[in-house]
Image (tube, coloured by chain):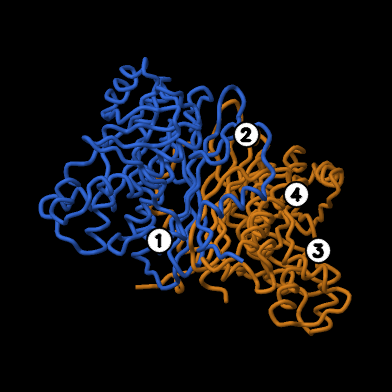
Chain colours: A orange, B blue
Amino acid sequence: MSSAKELGERKIIELILDCLDIMPNMPVPFGDDVSAIDLGNGKLLVVNTDMLVGKTDVPKSMNLWQAARKAVIMNISDLAAKGTPPIALLASIGINPSLTEADILQIGKGLNAGAREYDAYIVGGDTNEASDLTINCVALGVSEKRHLIKRDGTKSGDYVAVTGSFGKTAAGLKILMNNLSAPAIREPLVNSVLMPKARVKEGVALAQSGAATASIDVSDGLAWSLHELSRANNMGFRIDNLPIAPEVELFANIHDFDPITLALYGGEEYELLVTIKPDDWQKAAKAVENVGGSLIKIGVATKKKNILLYSGEKTVSIESRGWEHFKTD
Amino acid sequence: MSSAKELGERKIIELILDCLDIMPNMPVPFGDDVSAIDLGNGKLLVVNTDMLVGKTDVPKSMNLWQAARKAVIMNISDLAAKGTPPIALLASIGINPSLTEADILQIGKGLNAGAREYDAYIVGGDTNEASDLTINCVALGVSEKRHLIKRDGTKSGDYVAVTGSFGKTAAGLKILMNNLSAPAIREPLVNSVLMPKARVKEGVALAQSGAATASIDVSDGLAWSLHELSRANNMGFRIDNLPIAPEVELFANIHDFDPITLALYGGEEYELLVTIKPDDWQKAAKAVENVGGSLIKIGVATKKKNILLYSGEKTVSIESRGWEHFKTD
């Protein structure tokens, strides 16, 4: 019989979903970034839970303050993708008995810092003994039902857009894991790993503009998120403007990496990937700019279900791979 | 510097709380069974998160279906103590890569079974790789603000009551861990460990009756919960009717254990411990009986802050100890 390692995370999720009775009238289907409960009066409770595990989610050079903050940010990012600002979070922590008082204070301060950055509060939690550091957060927000941006509203011809450039996390991880040099550009690359940001302002602005037809956070890599969006909408994408961060181009050049691979197949970038009605493009871009962000058009949704990258004279197929627990080393 | 093991769970929680900015107008203070968010219109979102860790929360003879179900029940029990029925749960699971497909199905089915027993649904979650089995659930419910029973409303003279008898879990654990014999009574004792129940009907009935002045779930043992309630209310208790389960009396007799110790200092019994206005006693007892439960008067709240047990001619002080992560082996 197959082990979890052979099955991989996606298959494990499928197996578990098959065991569950489905709640009638779920406002958001399984597989979206968040779960939701109908509160009546046109309002939804929007909730997300994600577990950070030391072994797989915390690079060695990330300190406990940063790890705890990251556990908060990764949960807030999913709310951001739906256009819901976080109100409060709960945190269950599992810590090794050998951790010191100073370590515990780092965790507490990191949790608080992550929440306060986005005007939310930690309002509860749980403490446990565990071999490996485990921080499970729950992010809670309330959204107008009509404002929530699901994954499955894309129409053929919609523009595909993102809230930032890509590749920094993949490059930053290579610097940290393999001790690679990157003079002058080290800080932004490494910071994208150690100090991720959630695109809350951008997501909320897009939701309120009414211009976005679908949205997902790019926590498992841009290629993977494009494929998720493709599956949810039964649609393909033609990408003709892959926004690679300039620091990533430089880094790739120094160490002879392919910048496109770094931008497509990294993970944990926490940018938003959205689709926008063409007629609403100006409105959407303006809404995001008004809150200090930027919306970058990268392509268009197509009836043909393949996901293609046009770069110069070459056209390549974007593969369905990205970070996957159990399968990625 | 002290390690987590030396500090113990309560001190660790204190350290973390000291790091947190407190949300203004929190409807339920830190330290209560649940957290809450004001939804307006007199309604509260009631939420709880608890992490089940294989090493400390799952006895060897508990299978994965039971462990997953328990992870759900322990979260629902905290909502029950506040009188809030669960609507939905999320589950983050961390599993060892060596688990099989059959193991994963057991976990999925156990989660679903626990939720459906209390008319709730699993609506989302997260999957991760972890050395030790980790199941973190989040239980969500909505309560009328005026119905939520907090920990801190006890007045001197209030009756102290519980929703069931005690000692079964402590006895059951001894049977499982030390392979003790218990002819005829094995099943109810062992089942209290492997198949815990949450007192949702009882909690909801008490909340709607308006008769309960405070409530807490007895997940860390009756003695510990009495001390928690004492601290929250700045009050003591005189206990004169400790309801020891008849099977526990028998078991204690066979193996020469003290039944009072089993009833007071076990853990994870998930009964509710409540205080009731004396004038409302009939109303409260009736409300619980009407939903098929029972409310057992065990004592009275006192201005004197000690917690005393009157049993026959002896009076003993009930110690402030119970299950504590990091400190209990």
Nearer-the-camera pick, B256 or A42: B256
Q: Is mark 1 in CB contact (under 8 Å) with mark 2?
A: no
Q: Mark 1 vs mark 2: same chain?
A: yes
Identified by mark 4, the residue type is Glu
The residue identified by callout 1 is B56
Specify the farthest residue to the left: B184
> Alpha-carbon neighbours of circle 4 within 10 Å: few (<14), some, or many (≥20)?
few
Of mark 1 and mark 2, the one earlier in the sequence is 2
> Alpha-carbon neighbours of circle 1 within 10 Å: few (<14), some, or many (≥20)?
some
| Residue drawn where x is 50% and y is 30% of the image | B152
Under tag 4, what secondary structure?
Answer: helix
The N terminus of chain B sits in image quarter: bottom right
User: Could you tell me residue A156's position as x and y percent?
Assistant: 68, 50
The residue identified by callout 3 is A241
The residue identified by callout 4 is A117
Q: Mark 4 vs mark 2: same chain?
A: no
| Residue drawn where x is 73% and y is 68% of the image | A169
Q: Tell me, for residue B245, which label it has, or none.
A: none
Q: Mark 4 vs mark 3: same chain?
A: yes
User: What chain does mark 3 sit on?
Assistant: A
Mark nearest the camera among 4 and 1 is 1
CA gap between label 3 and label 2 equals: 46 Å
Identified by mark 1, the residue type is Thr
Nearer-the-camera pick, B8 or A36: B8
